[in-house]
Image (spheres, rainbow, N blue to C red):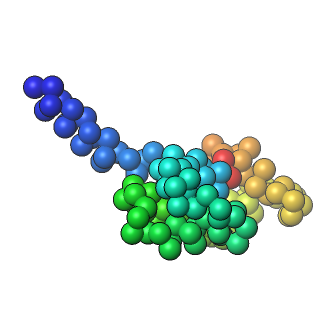
Amino acid sequence: MRRLIFAFTAGVLLVSTPAAFAQTVGFAEAIKILSASCGADINKYCKSATLANNGIGQCLDQNQAKVSQKCNADRAVVATLIQERLAAQAAAPKICQRDAAQRCKGVKPGAGHVLRCLLKAQRSVSAKCNTAIDLAGYR
């Protein structure tokens, strides 16, 4: 019976794991995720690799066959989520353009003023714009 409960719990955790990553991640979150799943591999295979110019990433690529499956899988997921975050940041201004024009009249563009206005007006901003702001990591 205990094995059945353990198997069920493990299955639920596996299914819910992507939610732990969120829909996009920033660099700080990516480092936390990867240090947890790749830390041992980095210490074992890439101790002398530098942070500059993606030295650790290149080292992990070169040792991909030796690196744990969890590390390789998380690296792929994190890379995708970072790309999605960057794409969301590029798309957010266009998605929120109408909301900005309606809710932030007279706000001087630049230095994050319009974003600050949209964040303050969250309740009256469209769901599409709020989602774009969230996916971009601005909230």
Whether residue 53 is visible, yes or no, is: yes
Residue drawn where x is 69% and y is 64% of the image: 50
- For the point 40% across and 57% down, the residue is 68
Q: Residue furthest left?
A: 1
Residue 126 in the image, given as x and y percentages of width and height: 59, 54
Residue 83 position (above or below residue 20): below
**Who's the residue at 44% across and 57% down the image?**
71
The image quadrant where one finds the N terminus is top left
Vertical comparison of 35 with 136: above or below: above
Q: Residue furthest top?
A: 2
Quarter location, residue 30 = bottom right
Q: Is residue 33 left or right of residue 136?
A: left
Q: How many numbered circles does the render carry?
A: 0
* Residue 12 drawn at (x, y percent): 27, 40
Choose between 120 and 4: the one closer to the eye. Answer: 4
- Residue 46 lies, in percent from the top left, at 58, 61
Left or right side of 55 for 22: left
Residue 135 seen anywhere in this rendered image of the structure: no
Q: Residue 115, how many percent across, how many down?
A: 76, 55
Tell me the residue at 13%/32% (across/down).
4
As rendered, which of 76 and 59 lies closer to the eye?
Answer: 59
Q: Nearer the viewer, residue 1 or 62?
A: 62
